[in-house]
Each structure stands twice: as C-alpha cells, then as structure tokens.
Image (cartoon, grey):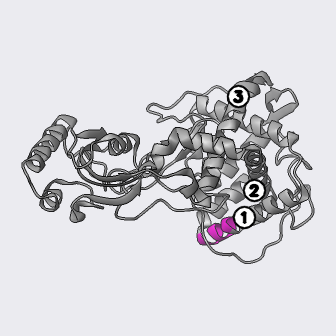
Amino acid sequence: MLRTKLLKKGILLALTAVLVIVLAAGCGKKEETPNNGGTNGEKPATGQTKAPGEGEGKVIATYKDGTITDGEFNKYTSFFGIVNPQTAMYLSIPQLKEQFLREYIGYKVLSSRLTPTDEEKKKTQEETDAFYTQVKTAMEQNPELKKTLDDAKLTEADIKYFYNMIMAIMKSEESKVTDDQVKTYFEKTKDDYNVITARHILVATADASTGEELRTEEEALKRAKNVKAKLDAGGDWNALAKEFSDDGGSKEKGGLYESQEAKAWVPEFKDAANKQEINKIGEPVKTDYGYHVIKVEKRESTAFDKLTDEKKLTLKQTVASENLNAFMTTELPGLITKIDLPQEEAPAGDGATNGGAANDGATNGGTTNGGATNNGKTNEAPTDDKKEETK
C-alpha cells in the first residue's frame, strides 16, 4: 500500500493527531488511576491542577501567563507519541519542534480561559475515559507501547489530562460557531459535496505496494494520452481499465467510482471531477500518483439542508478549527516572550509539516481521503474498492 501525507497547519495539529490515529477498539480490564494531583480514578477538570511535569527541569519557554519546562514539554510530546507514532520524527526537525511548543503554549492559554458548565465537563470526561480505554487496550495488545509509556513515565492521569485539555478547548470553540457560520462555510466549499459518478484509468509513476518507480512522468503521460486516444476512438472502458489502469481498486470495474462525494478525492482529481464536461473524456490529470484519464458520467449538487447531522457537525468542527488556527497565528505570538529550545540540526529531506502533525492514511492506488474522526471516535482509512488516495 502506498502511503501519503496529509499536512495540517497550526491548531489542526492536535485535532488531527489526537482524533485520527487509531489506537484500538473494545474495552480493557479495570485499572486504578495513578494519583497525579487529582482524586484516584478520576481525571481532574482542565485548569484545576498543574499540567503533568509542570515546573520540572529547565525553562524552555516564557509567555505572558507562565513558563514551560522541558519536563512538562517532554510529557506532552510523549503523549503525542501514543496517538501519532511519527511524533519523534517531526520533533527531530527544529522548526517543527518549536512550532509544536508554541502550539502547546496556545493550548495552555486557551485552557486557562475556559469556563465549562458541569454538563460540558461531564461529557468531556466521558470522552476522555473512553479514549483511555482505547489506550489500555492498545497497551495490552502492544507491549512496546506499554514500554514506551513506562519509559516516559507517562501515567494514566497524564494521558487523560492532555486529552481532556484538548477536547475541552475544541468543544468550547465548537460551541461558539453559529449555524450561519456553518452555512457560510458550506457555501464556500459546496463543490466538495457534489455526488459524482466517474470512470478513470490511472497510469501510475510508482508501484502502489512498494513505492518503486514504474515509469517516468514523461512515460506515464505518453501512456495516458495513448489510453485517451483509444477511449476517444470508442475503446471499451472495461477492457482498457484492465489492461492499462494501475488502480487496483477500480480496474476490474471499468475504472468506476459510483456516487462518490468529491471531497473524498485528492485536489487535482476532485477539481477535474467537479469541472469536466459530463460524458467527455478529459485530458490526463496529474496527481502525486501519476496521470488519470477521467470521464465524469454524472454530477449532482447537494443542498445544505440535505446534509446529514454528522456532516454538519464536521463542518462546524472545521470552522472551529479555523478559528483556533486564527488565534494561534494572530494573538498567540504576542503572548510568547521567549523560546529557548536547544539548537539541533535538521535532518536532510525532512518532509516537514507546519505544526508537526501528519495524518498518514493508507491508500489504494490513487484518489481518496484517509480516515477522519469525530469527537474522539476513530474511523479507519477507507478500504473500499472505490477509495484510492489520501488527499
């Protein structure tokens, strides 16, 4: 399977890393909660106790309302090592490590401003407990994970603290988003919700299983143009897809994607699917995987009032995330007075992200988004035959 990267900016770091990574499913056995500043078996409400590791070690950041020590930051990064195993790789890049630290300061500032109701606290706590149940199950199934947590001295209370903090912030921001804002955002992105039936033949530049080069871009483009010419001359999609397509998910179906939302596809493919003339074979479309020869057979728009509640919630969360990102990029810099991280050399070929989080969704040859989640419940990356590439 070919792996791809979904790069997230700013505040989307935590939202994506915490909520997208699949830890485990099911329940683990009952365990006592280590006492870390709260009552045993219960995670203290956000803002009521010190953060894990607070005040331990050297001060590495100073901001208007306090300081961050390397002990506290190490606890936080260890937490992210659970939900995103690639954290260590990202933090080996100095610029990303600093951005990660700045965002953590942002979370602490926002957390200190929260005034959740008892009902909001209860709901966030329930989700935090459910999340930790997943962690426990993962530890039971993966001794290496348990060793990592033990080595980092990351307790149950530590894990719950960080997760609760982030979820409380997200829920607070979501509560501020109005229905009108959601509708406005939908209008800006409504083409993402077009339901499209299309056929395509992928001429890949790399093998989907190994990543090894199959052909150069020039060779792929030449082959794609040859496929288009055959189709224009009346060639059969079923036969040509079997012969030429490198998309294992659709080649046996004549390259068919039936009734797919446009947002499931990578930007270049999505753009073509939204704009190409119906029943006309377009010029080859280049994506990271090669060249796609596409024919759009049907395209229907979706009205806002036809969206499911789940999709409306996703829109609301997106608006909330953008609002949080605005805080991170506008107000937060003025609150930070000093960053004093040890200087390290960045490794060559870093594949950097802004903020240090990436969502690596396993792909199946060429066009769909990876997993997404809602409120701490994970959805794995699609394995449907119609799904192909991570956006």
What residue sits right under mark 3 in the picture? 341
Residue 86 vs residue 389, the one in the foreground: 389
Q: What's the residue at 39%, 57% (across, down)? A: 260
Image coordinates of residue 18 in percent, x first then y, are 65, 52
What residue sits right under mark 2 in the picture? 159
Q: Earlier in the sequence, mark 2 or mark 3?
A: 2
Dot 1 alpha-carbon crowd within 10 angstroms: few under 14, some 14 to 19, many 20 or more: many
Could you give the CA–CA distance between mark 1 and mark 3, rounded to whole angstroms? Answer: 30 Å
Report helix, strand or loop for mark 2.
Answer: helix
Q: Amino acid at mark 1?
A: Tyr
Image coordinates of residue 111 in percent, x first then y, are 83, 43
Q: Earlier in the sequence, mark 2 or mark 1?
A: 1
Q: Which stretch appears magenta?
A: 134-141
Report helix, strand or loop for mark 1.
Answer: helix
Could you give the CA–CA distance between mark 2 and mark 3, rounded to whole angstroms? Answer: 24 Å
* Residue 67 visible from this viewpoint: yes
What residue sits right under mark 1 in the picture? 132
Main SS type for the magenta part? helix
